[in-house]
Each structure stands twice: as structure tokens, then as C-alpha cells.
């Protein structure tokens, strides 16, 4: 992929309307798109290769399964907002809110394929093998420098420091499977990944 194409994509965040659908629909369409992170004058980009969809009521693995709380209120808000939370007090995880306001939904970004700003990623998260750099939800946030300060960032405006842009969809092969690391709703096929990518989480 040429740098010119990347630069063009950097300035085209996906619009609110893209996210105003059920989380499973958005999740499938996010495979192959680009997460763009601006920080300290630099741009870091990773191609989405793995995601998980979360609904509200009726989804026992969702933060919103029992209704709205101060923590999950953003999941009931406007689509296209970043929902970043601390998992088990250790790793920040990046989600994007989906659906119409008042109805909870979000997609967890589980793995990226590094595209641009790789040296910055490696400085943020030193690894021996590049394939391990962003192959997990906690790994990718550390590599891209995403933290709790990015919670509630609007990911649909060009001036945002964090958003998702158009990517390369023609080379993807999307597969579905159960979500990972949950104890409820294991039978729901709401994890989607690019079968051909080496950067999918293990």
C-alpha cells in the first residue's frame, strides 16, 4: 500500500452513519479498516484484523447486559464514540460505540496489523517479533498509546486524535467464531477476524 493512499485514508474517518447499525454488522465491516492515532505530531496506523461485537440486554458478556450504569453509559450514547476502559486493572481496551442512541452496542478492536508508525509502536511496546506487536486488544492500545484519556473521543471527525478510516477490504477473508476470554455467552459467534492475517490474536 502506498504512502499516498495511506495519507488519503488518514483524512477520511468513517461517518456516524457507518456505526448506526447493530454491532455485529459494524464488526464485520470494520475488518480491513484503519485505526488512526495522532500523538505528539506523529501518525500511527494499524489495519483492523480482529474484532468482537457486544450488544446490550440479552448479551450476557456485555457491560450493558443489566442496563445503564455510570461506567457503560457511553454504550447507550451516540455511535462513533470511543469507549476505552481498563480491563482487570491492567490493560486499556478500545471499543467503538454502535447503534442508535438509547440502545447499547459496541465493537471491541481485538487486533491490528501495523501499517505506519511502526517504530513508534515498538518504542511504546518493545517486542522481539513484529507479529506480536498489536496481536491482542491490550497489546494494540499500548503500542498506539491509547489510554483512558481517549474514552469518549469522537472517532467520526477528521480533527480527532483517534479514529477509524477506510482501508483495504478486497484482500480480507472474514470468519466468525465465539468471543475470547468470557464466561457467559460463549455460544454467540460474535468474534470476527481476517483468516489470512498473521496478526490475529492467539
Image: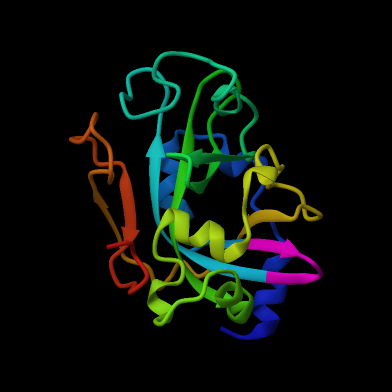
Q: Residue at x 43, y 26 (%)?
A: 63
Q: Residue at x 58, y 79 (%)?
A: 118
Q: Residue 43 at what x, y percent from top left?
A: 71, 70
Q: Which quarter of the rendering shows the C terminus?
A: bottom left
| Front-most of residues 58 and 43 | 43
Return the residue found at the far top.
67
Q: Which residues are magenta?
A: 36-43
Return the residue found at the far bottom.
2
Q: Residue 146 at what x, y percent from top left?
A: 62, 54
Which quadrant of the structure image shows residue 85?
A: top right
Judge whether 177 appears above or below 171 on screen: above
Judge whether residue 166 can be spotted in this image.
Answer: no
Residue 80 included in the magenta stretch of the image: no
Q: Residue 56 at what x, y percent from top left?
A: 42, 23
177 lies left or right of 70: left
16 lies left or right of 126: right
Amino acid at each position: 500500500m502506498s504512502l499516498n493512499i495511506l495519507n488519503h485514508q488518514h483524512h477520511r474517518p468513517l461517518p456516524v452513519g457507518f456505526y448506526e447499525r447493530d454491532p455485529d454488522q459494524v464488526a464485520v465491516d470494520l475488518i480491513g479498516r484503519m485505526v488512526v492515532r495522532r500523538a505528539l505530531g506523529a501518525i500511527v496506523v494499524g489495519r483492523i484484523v480482529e474484532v468482537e461485537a457486544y450488544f446490550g440486554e440479552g448479551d450476557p458478556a456485555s457491560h450493558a447486559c443489566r442496563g445503564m450504569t455510570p461506567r457503560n453509559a457511553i454504550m447507550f450514547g451516540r455511535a462513533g464514540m470511543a469507549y476505552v476502559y481498563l480491563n482487570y486493572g491492567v490493560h486499556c481496551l478500545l471499543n467503538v460505540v454502535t447503534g442508535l442512541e438509547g440502545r447499547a452496542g459496541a465493537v471491541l478492536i481485538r487486533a491490528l496489523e501495523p501499517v505506519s508508525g511502526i517504530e513508534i509502536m515498538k518504542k511504546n511496546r518493545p517486542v522481539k517479533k513484529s507479529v506480536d506487536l498489536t496481536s491482542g486488544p491490550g497489546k494494540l492500545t499500548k503500542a498506539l498509546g491509547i489510554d483512558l484519556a481517549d474514552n469518549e473521543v469522537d472517532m467520526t471527525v477528521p480533527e480527532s486524535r483517534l479514529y477509524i478510516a477506510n482501508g483495504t477490504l478486497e484482500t480480507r477473508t472474514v470468519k466468525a467464531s465465539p468471543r475470547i476470554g468470557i464466561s457467559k455467552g460463549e455460544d454467540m459467534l460474535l468474534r470476527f477476524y481476517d483468516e489470512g492475517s498473521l496478526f490475529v490474536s492467539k
